[in-house]
Image: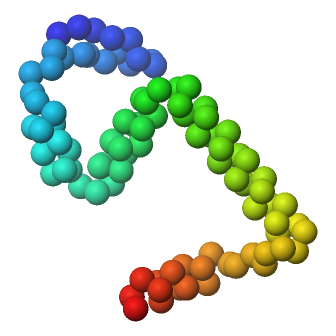
């Protein structure tokens, strides 16, 4: 076991003694909120250069959508109405 400083509290890194399949099975047995948190942390651990590119692409997409609304090319839809539309489409 190796001590690793992480934030204000020490954490411990254990040698990998389980397979990816075993880890997956254990993760899938967690409650959904814990799985979501785990997934978020795993995604955050991915290659930061790739993450920067994704952030740049989303920023460009957000700017494009903002400009479409400002120009009148599209009309915004309130969140609840958008979700209702999606639900109608999915349940067809």
Tell me the quarter of the picture where residue 68 sits.
bottom right
Is the residue 87 above or below the residue 21 in the image? Answer: below
In this view, the residue in front, 54 or 10, is 54
In this picture, residue 45 sits left or right of residue 51:
left
Tell me the quarter of the picture where residue 6 sits.
top left
In this picture, residue 74 sits left or right of residue 54:
right
Residue 39 is situated, as x and y percent measured from the top left of the image, at 35, 44
Which residue is at 78% across, 53% downward?
Answer: 63
Is the residue 36 above or below the residue 76 in the image? Answer: above
| Residue at the limit of the structure toward the right, as seen here | 71
Q: How is the image coloured?
A: rainbow
Which residue is at 53% across, 85% downward?
Answer: 84
In this picture, residue 65 sits left or right of residue 21:
right
Is the residue 70 above or below the residue 7 in the image? Answer: below
Residue 16 is situated, as x and y percent measured from the top left of the image, at 15, 20
Which residue is at 53% across, 26% downward?
Answer: 48
In this picture, residue 11 sits left or right of residue 91:
left
Q: Quadrant of the C terminus?
A: bottom left
Residue 34 is situated, as x and y percent measured from the top left of the image, at 30, 49
Is the residue 55 above or below the residue 5 in the image? Answer: below
Which residue is at 10% across, 30% downward?
Answer: 19
Q: Quadrant of the N terminus?
A: top left
Count of numbered circles on the image = 0
Residue 70 is situated, as x and y percent measured from the top left of the image, at 88, 67
């Amino acid at each position: 076991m190796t001590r690793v400083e992480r934030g204000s509290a020490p954490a411990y890194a254990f040698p990998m003694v389980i397979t990816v399949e075993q880890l997956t099975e254990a993760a899938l047995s967690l409650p959904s909120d814990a799985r979501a948190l785990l997934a978020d942390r795993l995604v955050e651990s991915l290659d930061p250069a790739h993450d920067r590119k994704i952030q740049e692409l989303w920023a460009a997409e957000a700017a494009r959508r903002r400009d479409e609304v400002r120009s009148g090319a599209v009309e915004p839809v309130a969140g609840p109405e958008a979700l209702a539309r999606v639900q109608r489409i999915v349940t067809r």
